[in-house]
Amino acid sequence: MTGKERDVFEVLINISGIGPKLALSLVGHMSLTDLQSAVINADSKFISRVPGVGKKTAERLIVEMRDKLPDMFGKNPSEYQVIVAAGSGSQLSRDIAGALVNLGYNQIKAQTAAQKTIESRSESSDLSVLIREALKFVN
């Protein structure tokens, strides 16, 4: 665990309803960039994809972390939103990553595999075929 991940973990465990196990799950299933983006954009649906995080917990996390993000990451939220908009993947990439996460793979590895699959994909655009191809990149 990196220093920033540890800092985020410590902030997460101080949020009502989030214990050490859930905080570790959040840090492990999503990159810090994705977590920051979800908090800034109030995307409770994205956060609630993490196993054990419900809608209310995700909303509470967003409210309580919103003020702490600039101190933790040192970026102005308006600057960050531009970065997120420019770097966000396609819906197909998110679908592939979501399927891999549902199969039990780490969020970061799933996103990387989905991106590699999109970059190297054959002519097939069938989601099931692309998910099978992405499985090759996960390990």
Image (cartoon, rainbow, N blue to C red):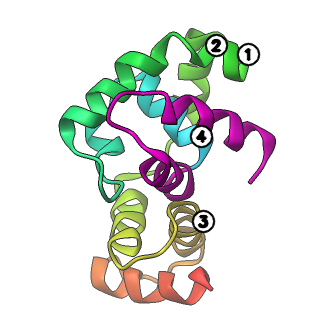
Q: Which circle's residue, 3 or 4, is located before the other in the chain?
A: 4
Residue that appears at 56% across and 64% down:
115
Boundaries of the magenta span: 1-30
Residue that appears at 56% across and 72% down:
113
Q: Is residue 87 visible?
A: no
Q: Which residue carries the number 4 mark?
A: 9
Instruction: Name the main secondary structure of what is drawn in magenta.
Output: helix
**Image height check: is 50 above or below 73?**
below
The answer for how far apart the CA atoms under marks 3 and 1 are is: 25 Å
- Quarter of the image containing the N terminus? bottom right
Residue that appears at 35% across and 79% down:
103
The answer for how far apart the CA atoms under marks 3 and 4 are is: 23 Å
Image spot of residue 88 (x, y percent): 50, 42
In the rendered structure, which amino acid carries the disc numbered 1? Answer: Gly
Q: CB under 8 Å between callouts 3 and 4?
A: no
Q: Which residue carries the number 1 mark?
A: 74
Q: Which of marks 3 and 2 is in front?
A: 2
Q: Which residue carries the number 2 mark?
A: 70
Q: Nearer the viewer, mark 2 or mark 4?
A: 4
Image spot of residue 5 (x, y percent): 68, 43
Q: Which circle's residue, 2 or 4, is located before the other in the chain?
A: 4
